[in-house]
Amino acid sequence: MSTDGVLTRTTFGWTSSQNFTSLCPNGSEWVWEGLGECAQDARDMASVYLGLLSILCFLVSSFPQYYNSWKSGNMDQALSIWFLLLWLGGDSCNLIGSFLADQLPLQQYTAIYYVAADLIMLSMYTYYKLKNKASQGRTHLLMVGVSCFLCFATSLTQLPDVGPHKEIIPSGFRSRSLLSTSSTSSVTPFTTKEIIGFCIGSVSSVLYLCSRGPQIYTNFKRKSTQGVSYFLFALVILGNTTYGLSVLLKNPDLGQGESSYMIHHVPWLIGSLGTLSLDLIISVQFLIYRNARPRVEVNHDETAPLIRS
């Protein structure tokens, strides 16, 4: 909302009684109206385009896995439940932290889709787990735990900002003359709300890094990647790369130096760019096990004939 010409941020962008020209001179109007950002130069526009490409990659990344799971019917064997749960936990923390830490609008929009896609994939995993008559207890317990965590985490987004009062300026909005006179080496102080968001974002990056381990182990144990869609990880790699570059290319806000901007975005950069090396390991596993079939333990029970014909 806007009061007396002071710009404040809403959930999906910026509002003000002042017009677009005065708030974002030489900026892109469609970016301002559609994304709630002020993109004034080529660097800002490159950040926006990479962010949109990142969203597109993550948007379609899950569909190959959905199809592969439907076709093979062994999603519960191919994917590690801990991979999915840690991924969901990381995306949930990313969603909450991005709002509390006042990250870029594109980061927030992407985070919302992350959680929705994870819940769909986890639901499919549970469906195939039950369909294949596997143990139901652990899966149900984990699902309840995740649901409780999401309910608790969502309530944190309602925490008031009790930090020092300051005028809020849209992401990417800056006056070149004012920016040149501001300090580019000092770090902008964190408000209490931003500190909480930063901490949750840090937990998110750790969960992202830990999520790949169970899947790497599952592939190694099975000596196969059958049932896992490589396009899922390929698009995630591309999405994380463009996401990280989008954050890196964005110009700092008014009065904020490059170092301060980087510090405020460290957890999200680690969560995106830091997982690339682990995703590359999974890519190597796809190459190694591309022609292998999953190992199946032979069950020697009473149904086996005693005399071979």
Image (cartoon, rainbow, N blue to C red):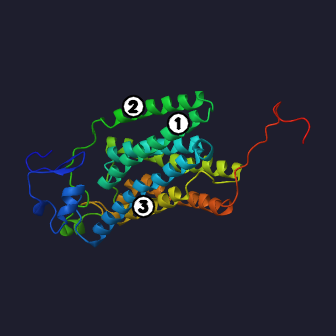
Q: Amino acid at mark 1?
A: Tyr
Label whose residue precedes the other's in the sequence (3 or 2)? 2
Secondary structure, mark 1, is helix
**Who is closer to the viewer here, 160 or 44?**
44
The local crowd at label 3, few if under 14, some if 14 to 19, many if 20 or more residues have their Cα within 10 Å, is many
Residue carrying label 3: 244
Q: CA distance from mark 1 to mark 2?
A: 23 Å
Q: How many marks?
A: 3
Mark 3 in CB contact with mark 1 (< 8 angstroms):
no
Q: How far from the left and from the top, in percent, is residue 299?
A: 79, 37
Q: How far from the left and from the top, in percent, is residue 95?
A: 38, 45
Secondary structure, mark 2, is helix
Q: Amino acid at mark 3?
A: Gly
Q: Quadrant of residue 249?
A: bottom left
Q: In this view, which residue lies farthest toward the right? A: 307
Residue carrying label 1: 127
Q: Amino acid at mark 2?
A: Cys
Mark 3 in CB contact with mark 2 (< 8 angstroms):
no
- Look at 32% across and 55% down and name the residue there: 106
- Look at 18% across and 69% down and name the residue there: 177
Q: How far from the left and from the top, in percent, is residue 79?
A: 59, 46
Label whose residue precedes the other's in the sequence (3 or 1)? 1
Q: CA distance from mark 3 to mark 1?
A: 34 Å
User: Which quarter shows the C terminus?
Assistant: top right
The local crowd at label 1, few if under 14, some if 14 to 19, many if 20 or more residues have their Cα within 10 Å, is some
Q: Note whether 118 is above or below 282 in the view shown.
A: above
Label whose residue precedes the other's in the sequence (1 or 2)? 1
Residue carrying label 2: 151
